[in-house]
Image: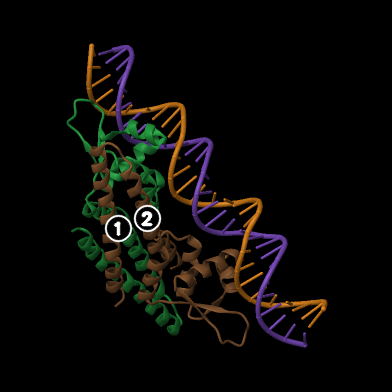
Chain colours: A brown, B green, C orange, D purple
Amino acid sequence: MIEVFVDGVKVLGLPRSIGEIYGLLFISPEPQSLDDLVHRLGISKGSASQGLRTLKELGAVKDTSGSVSRRTYYQADIELKRLVGGFIREQLRPHLESGQLKVGRLVEAVSEQDDPEMQQFYDERIERLEFWMRRGRQVLPIVQKVLGQ
Amino acid sequence: MIEVFVDGVKVLGLPRSIGEIYGLLFISPEPQSLDDLVHRLGISKGSASQGLRTLKELGAVKDTSGSVSRRTYYQADIELKRLVGGFIREQLRPHLESGQLKVGRLVEAVSEQDDPEMQQFYDERIERLEFWMRRGRQVLPIVQKVLGQ
DNA sequence: GGGTTTGTTCATTTTGAATTGAACAATACC
DNA sequence: GGTATTGTTCAATTCAAAATGAACAAACCC
């Protein structure tokens, strides 16, 4: 099972430890502590801590607080809606935004081009790029909607 | 500009050389030969050859044949529809399929579980996983449709 | 306060994927 | 045929991202 998730997160560009952690939590009926993860997966405390942080940011795990013990225990959040939302927010949007910044700088660079024929070609290509990015932004909410049902 | 594409392909889990090659072709008014890529990008012949192959498989470049010279020259294909289609076909579908195989093996493994309570829990989780995969397969054609306009 | 448990940070190490480059086709041309 | 040109393959190398682990912080208990 864990293997399935390791493959899964790799497709999404996330490290294998994240897949292992989420996979283990996904098939654990009981919440697991950081220490449990370290022992059961054979990974370092550092990896487990980092991995849990990322998963929390993605909204893929929640900690069951309010326990008697002072340890925190983690559970997998299995709502697809939430997972997809977190991934888009944390991984995709930042890239789209930094891409837009760079394209913005390109627009300026092209305006300094002398050769009018070249300038027109570059303008067309940048327009194409901006078109792709618009489409990208359009498709995200649709994906979110379809998956969150 | 090339930087934009390097970032872009990295999000998709492809190596930077692919981003460089596609980026250069994207802003080149004239088709470029393998040798041009090697010189202008400062990458090895091996990288260029491999990268072009992957890009051809993705349908992201086409070679302009029918020239007098025996060299082949490459151009970027800038149809979003085609790019998305190629990516889904070459990168996403294979992973979805191998995932399904693994889940299939899981189903068998769970049926050998003694404890009925555990078995029920595992069944639920596997059902959840299969639900996610169904949704994944559903969303692909929708993405393709939205982006290909 | 001192001691213990739990979790984080971050410099170093490891590992796996990407790149290189040299040997090897394949094709064209004479 | 021989040789030049172009492109591919793949073992060896390089490099960036991930994992480690030790030092550090924070919270808790007595």
Pointer 1: what residue? A133
Residue drawn at 34 percent across, 59 percent down? B95
Residue at (29, 70) in percent of width and height = A141
Secondary element at tag 2: helix
Determine whether D3 is above or below D23 in the image. above
Name the one closer to the observer, A8 or B40: B40
Q: Position of residue A43 (x, y in %)?
A: 57, 64
Q: Which mark is residue A99?
A: 2
- Asked which quadrant contains residue B121, the reply is bottom left
Is residue B5 in view from this perspective?
yes
The quadrant of the rendering that contains the C terminus of chain A is bottom left
Contact between marks 1 and 2 (CB within 8 A): the answer is yes
Residue at the image position 35 percent from the left and 35 percent from the top: B37
Using the image, name the chain to which the residue with label 1 belongs: A
Mark earlier in primary sequence (1, 2):
2
In the image, taking residue B99 as reference, residue A60 lies left or right, namely right
At label 1, which amino acid type do we have?
Met
Q: Which structural element holds mark 1?
A: helix
Residue at 31%, 40% (x, y): give it: A113
- Name the amino acid, label 2: Gly
**Visible in this render: residue A44?**
no
Specify the quadrant of the image occupied by residue B97.
bottom left
- Taking A111 as reference, is B99 above or below it? below
